Image: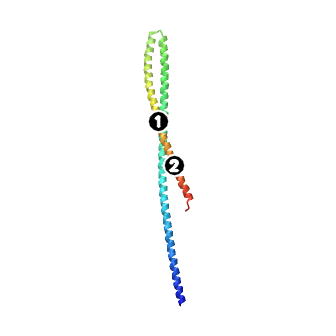
Amino acid sequence: MQRSLSFIFGFLLIATVTFGQTASTDSQTLRALLAEVRQLRHELQTATVAAQRVQIALYRLQRQETAVARATQGLGDARSKLADTESTREKTAVQIQQYEEIQGHTQDPQERKEAEYLLLQLKSRLEMLGNEQQQRQTQEAEAEEQLRAEQAKLEALQALLDRIDKSIMDVGGQSANSPH
């Protein structure tokens, strides 16, 4: 009987110790799982924020590329208008020389008077074209400055995307190297 009692007592003691260890092991496992779930949630939130930042940066980059294209077009238009004005001004200067030669070589008073009248109109037009040329040069300089500013913004956005890409690669490299 004593042997039976010892056996039962020993069995209960071992069962209690084993049950306590199982509860402790389950509790540690649950804590570890909870910690991992929290870490995964944090990483998911971080990834979501990073994805949103990338989308915003890409949208801004797209808008900035459009702004650069507009500024490039504006500069092209300004240069074209300036070239047209310069060409017209050169042609007018040539016409003035021609009428001055006609006026200096003609003996006919009527022809001389017509040349004089045309010379006054052409000189007035040449002066007007000179003013227009100055305005066009100013517009071209402003368009060049606008283009440089837009290109600088574009380069800054590209640098931002490069930094985001690098940080994503760094995080990806850390995740690949860390044990799960």
Q: Nearer the viewer, residue 61 or 162?
A: 162
Residue at (52% x, 87% y) in the render: 5
Instruction: Please report the residue visible at 51 percent of the width from the left and 49 percent of the height from the top.
Output: 163
Q: Which mark is residue 154?
A: none
Q: Position of residue 120 (x, y in %)?
A: 43, 17
Element marked by disc 1:
helix
Residue position marked by numbered label 1 in the rendering: 145
Q: Quadrant of the C terminus?
A: bottom right
Tell me the amino acid under the disc marked 1.
Glu
Q: Residue at x 48, y 53 (%)?
A: 50
- Residue 154: percent from the left, percent from the top? 49, 42
Using the image, determine if residue 155 lies above or below residue 120.
below
**Relative height, residue 73 to residue 22 (above, below):** above
Q: Position of residue 133 (x, y in %)?
A: 46, 27
Q: Tell how many labels.
A: 2
Circles 1 and 2 in contact, beta carbons < 8 Å: no
Amino acid under disc 2 = Arg
- Look at the image and name its color scheme: rainbow
Give the spatial CA distance, label 1 vs label 2. 27 Å
Camera-nearest residue between 126 and 31: 31
Say which of marks 1 and 2 sits in front: 2
Label 2 CA crowd tier, 10 Å (few <14, some 14–19, many 20+): few
Determine which residue is flagged by label 2: 163
